[in-house]
Amino acid sequence: MSEHGAHPVDPAVDEATAGFWDELYQRRDQVWSGRANSVLAEVVEPLPPGTALDLGCGEGGDAIWLAGRGWRVTAVDVSATALGRLTAAATRAGVASRITAARHDLTRTFPAGSYDLVSAQFLQSPLELPREVVLRAAVRAVAPGGRLLVVEHGAPPPWARESHPHARFASPEEILAALDLDAAGWHTERLGAAYRTGTGPDGETGTLVDHVVLVRRRD
Ligand SMILES: C[S@@+](CC[C@H](N)C(=O)[O-])C[C@H]1O[C@@H](n2cnc3c(N)ncnc32)[C@H](O)[C@@H]1O
């Protein structure tokens, strides 16, 4: 694994964005579950392993799960703290050789290459994040025959007491439109909502709604 945390001040990274996410991660030893996101696991289960690009990979639950299934993963995040945790967890899981961790502020730089799977799982932020710019770069990174999977929170969690930072939740159709696909070159495999049970900060459980877009580039 390579590339992350090389220098504390990186001109290609917005320091306010990096600082916000690093601070969020540093508040707890582990922020996310460490497991793969359920829609990603469902989509990938029947696929043969290939190359994957995980955008906003966080602590690496998806990347490590993919690598465990034989995928070669480029895992990207703006937070050096998250990438450090991913590196440590991948080493413990014995899959570090199949993961390249790279620090990018995706609004400024984007990893090179093309991939069989490009995944953006909850790449949402209370800070300004020009999604369309990032999503269109994600489209360009999909190899012929490859897929782009975008999963976003579709509504605030039932335990949210105040207005949620992601005040505006895009519909699946709006996410698809933001990709600006050339219709002849792409097939939409999945478009809609998915539901899962989640646990809130006080241990309460509730149903969470996710918005899912899965598109495949024609060969
Ligand atoms: C809500 S978390 C989702 C993490 C992970 N995909 C998951 O599902 O557990 C969003 C992630 O996007 C990253 N992120 C936010 N803005 C970013 C940016 N401009 N460039 C790269 N990563 C960013 C954050 O550091 C964070 O790890």
Image (cartoon, helix red, strand yellow):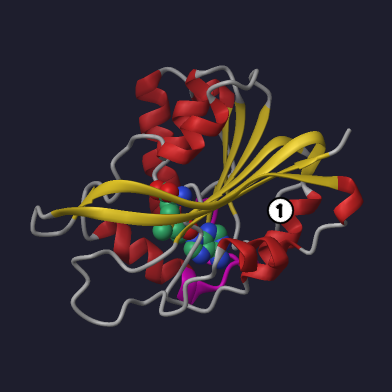
Please tell me whether residue 11 belongs to the stretch shown in magenta.
yes
Residue 127 in picture, x, y percent from top left: 46, 77
Say what amino acid the circle numbered 1 marks: Ala
Residue 145 appears in view: yes
Please tell me whether residue 104 belongs to the stretch shown in magenta.
no
Quarter of the rendering occupied by the N terminus: top right
The magenta stretch is 5-17
Q: Residues within 10 Å of mark 1 (few under 14, many from 20)?
A: many
Going by the picture, which residue comes out furthest to the front? Answer: 192
Say above or below: 217 vs 160. Answer: above
Overall secondary structure of the magenta section? loop
What residue is disc 1 on?
Answer: 138
Say above or below: 28 vs 125. Answer: above
Residue 107 appears in view: no
Residue 72 in picture, x, y percent from top left: 62, 26
The foreground one among 142 and 41 is 41
The foreground one among 49 and 215 is 215
